[in-house]
Image (cartoon, coloured by chain):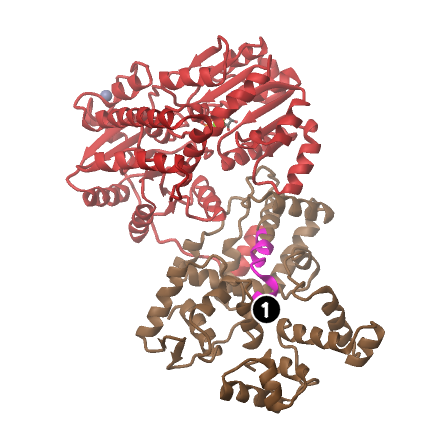
Amino acid sequence: MSMFKQLVHHILTKLQQERTVSSVYHLLKGKKSGQTLEDVGMYQLHAFYHLLPKLKRSVYDEVIVALEQEHKIQRTEQGYILHEPYEGHYHFNGWIYRGKEHLFFERCVLVTQTLSHVKAQDMHFTPMVKSITTQQFVKQFLQAEHYHDNQLTTRWLTELKQALQHADLTEMMRVSFVYRLSGHALPGYTWQQLADAQKMSVLDMQIIFIESLHIMMQAKTPLLLALQKDCITSNFLTVSSRQTYEMLQLGYTLEQISQQRSLKINTIQDHIVEIARNVPGFSLQPYVQADTVRQVWEAVNAYQTFKLKTLQEILQLPYFELKLALTRKGE
Amino acid sequence: MLHHLKHYLGYNEFRPGQQEVVEALLQGKDVLALLPTGMGKSLCYQLTGKMMQRTVLIISPLLSLMQDQVEQMKKMGIKRVIALNSFLTRMEKQQALQQLSQYEFIFTSPEMLQQGDVKERLTQLNIGLITIDEAHCISQWGYDFRPDYLRLGKWLKSQKNIPILALSATATYEVMDDIKKVLHMTSPFVYLHNMDRKELHFSRKWFNTTDEKVRWIKEHVMQTMGPGIIYTPSRRKTEEIARLLQDVHIQAAAYHAGLESHDRQLIQAQFIANELEWIVATSAFGMGVHKPNIRQVIHETMSPSLAHYMQEAGRAARDGQDAVATLLCAPGDDEIIRFLALDDLPTKNMVTDFYAGRQLELSETQLRVLTYWYSEWSYDEAIQKLKELITQKMTAIRATQDVLYTDECMRVLLMSHFGQSKQVEELCCSLCSDAVDNLIKVRKWMPLPQQMKLNWQERLDKLLN
Ligand SMILES: Nc1ncnc2c1ncn2[C@@H]1O[C@H](COP(=O)(O)OP(=O)(O)OP(=O)(O)O)[C@@H](O)[C@H]1O
Ligand SMILES: [Mg+2]
Ligand SMILES: [Zn+2]
């Protein structure tokens, strides 16, 4: 069973038959449209956002056809019917890395290649990574860490080994990671070679690799952390909302924030709606009860509408609670 | 001279042509130098620049090539080198321009030279030499037409009194004339290498079908020794043949422009480290790859021009040991070659539509060519140009077909195409002597499947410990 097919199947299951099959494609590509971003929040799909920005439509369509032929799903005029749900277990974190895990890895490649050549006392080599920005970044990093003494190599090796011990990594992920690295007289493997070694497709290999990078990037040891610079997207909140979010995390209440920042309660409430949409796993509990959320969605289904005004008239709920409830579908 | 060579670059002696070229440049002459691939064209401007103690500007057509050259020079210990190209971000470019006077060698692309700020900055520098690498790209007769190279001529005209060095490995007489004209070279010193290399032997094989070629490749590779390159025009075929070879445990990989850059680097590195024995490639492979011990080059299909063919075949035997270039032929190849050669030319209808401002789908090259024509020529002139180009391409195709169908000698045809005469007699080509194929070494061992032998800790230790 292909890893990619499973992934698509998993996301289709999460979408609860409420979207078209294309929305999975847009999600994986990391489309910035309102619809896709809303899906991310509503069905809590942050993990999968922007995993495969280069995914070809034809490749995606093939998988949909395969899922249909296997009677897992069936396309309809409005969307699709899920005949058989599938829930996998993933460690992706696409929302915050957004493709930048590859930048992190390229830096790892260059650092390893350089240190391997230092060890071999042969500094004549062609860098495996061609991006000048990455080359300069790594150069500065290495100079700051005094790469000519062997200590850095030892530290780097130790950090890599430690990160590779992460329990969420499989043995296959570990071996693929280290075989993709190059060193002195030891070139790494191409995607095709890695995939052949594991008897899987190139796309599956790349997906697994992305997952391993997301797991390894949880490592917060100094060198690995330094190489993650600018690889994490944290500006999915407006500046003002981010301030509110930070204060919430420090334990301030809505009212306190409003007072301290001299902003209207309404404004702070809008911030919280934005936070609920964008911060994976942000809990709605303090602001709206689970029962209320359920009620709102029942009304949406019964009256076939998302119009705030109509819903408000039916349910007689504050707008804030309504809006919050509408940010979240899956849980 | 030798003393300078040793002092600046650490070499003990000149290779043929290098000294002549450098001396002419130092006398202030323009130079057109044709030296074989991998024989050290770069040295000509490196040494001249060092001896003049002035900035050298090198205009190079391919971004990847440019970076390879910069890296190679840094490896040699020449540190004040920079590549000014479209790989740079806006910030990087601004920074580079500001610090430009610090550099001894500045690589740039013809496209970059069209940009106002670059042009302006360059005129402020103390440039002592302008080098045009792969100068055959200038020629409208050449196989890789680049309008920006033509525009280059205008700019060069304004750079008075700076000697110009035009470098190429493969150029016919027509192309050489074009180069001189476009670059406004005044009575240049011309150095022509002898293209005939005695260590490179030619072989030709005919088949009834394309499938037979592929079957032959598989059998042949299993029985003989690499390292080698198999050239084929189609990406799909590179993968197909590579897969066939891997299935019989030959260490082979496909290489084409569709692979991501990192993968391409890895394949080159593996080939150079002898971890790969065969590369199955489109014409995207080769520029900037210096592997001395390539023993075989196989053309699954003839290249779209003899200039292409000689450059590809010429990657073999750089170490001076014997190597064989084998050309496979089958009925129908003519069509394929014609298609490849004319593929990137616009059609007459495209020219008409383009001039009429109609929307149309164009390849990158077609767009490049048409945009240039539009900016320089009237519609009638453009149609005339197109006719000329088609005639030229057809002539080039006919030259490749001569090699496909001759019953006499491949080498005579190849050399005469470049205006030279054949000098090598012994084991010249398979049409002159059956013994050519015996130069290919017989495989003595059976290859084993490639595996990841190390576990992850072991490989990490091997990399870093
Ligand atoms: N005089 C010399 N003595 C020893 N080695 C030399 C000499 N001149 C050049 N070389 C070496 O030959 C190799 C090829 O040189 P270079 O890259 O200049 O070739 P080229 O002619 O530009 O090839 P291409 O056609 O691939 O661009 C380099 O590794 C260079 O160091
Ligand atoms: Mg060169
Ligand atoms: Zn002959």
Q: Front-most of A231 and A38? A: A38
At which x and y percent is residue B436?
A: 24, 27
Q: In terms of secondary structure, where does tag 1 sit?
A: loop
- Residue situated in front as seen by the camera: B433 or B213: B213
Residue at x-position 50% and y-position 37%: B64
Residue at 43 percent across and 26 percent down: it is B137
Name the residue rendered at 72%, 69% in the picture: A241
In the image, is residue A104 part of the stretch drawn in magenta? Answer: yes
A151 vs B427, left or right, is right
Residue A304 lies, in percent from the top left, at 49, 84
- Report the amino acid beneath label 1: His
Which quadrant does the C terminus of chain A fall into?
bottom right
Percent position of residue A135, x then y: 62, 44
Q: Give the image quarter of residue B106.
A: top right
Foreground residue, A320 or A88?
A320
In this rendering, the answer to whether A251 lies above or below A197 is below
Quadrant for residue B271, please give it: top left
Q: What segment carries the magenta color?
A: A93-106
Please give the letter of the chain rendered in red.
B
Q: Is mark 1 within 8 Å of ligand 1?
A: no
Does the magenta-highlighted stretch encompass residue B233? Answer: no
Residue A215 in sight in this render? no
User: Which chain is drawn using brown?
Assistant: A
Q: Residue furthest left?
A: B208
Q: Which residue is mark 1?
A: A166
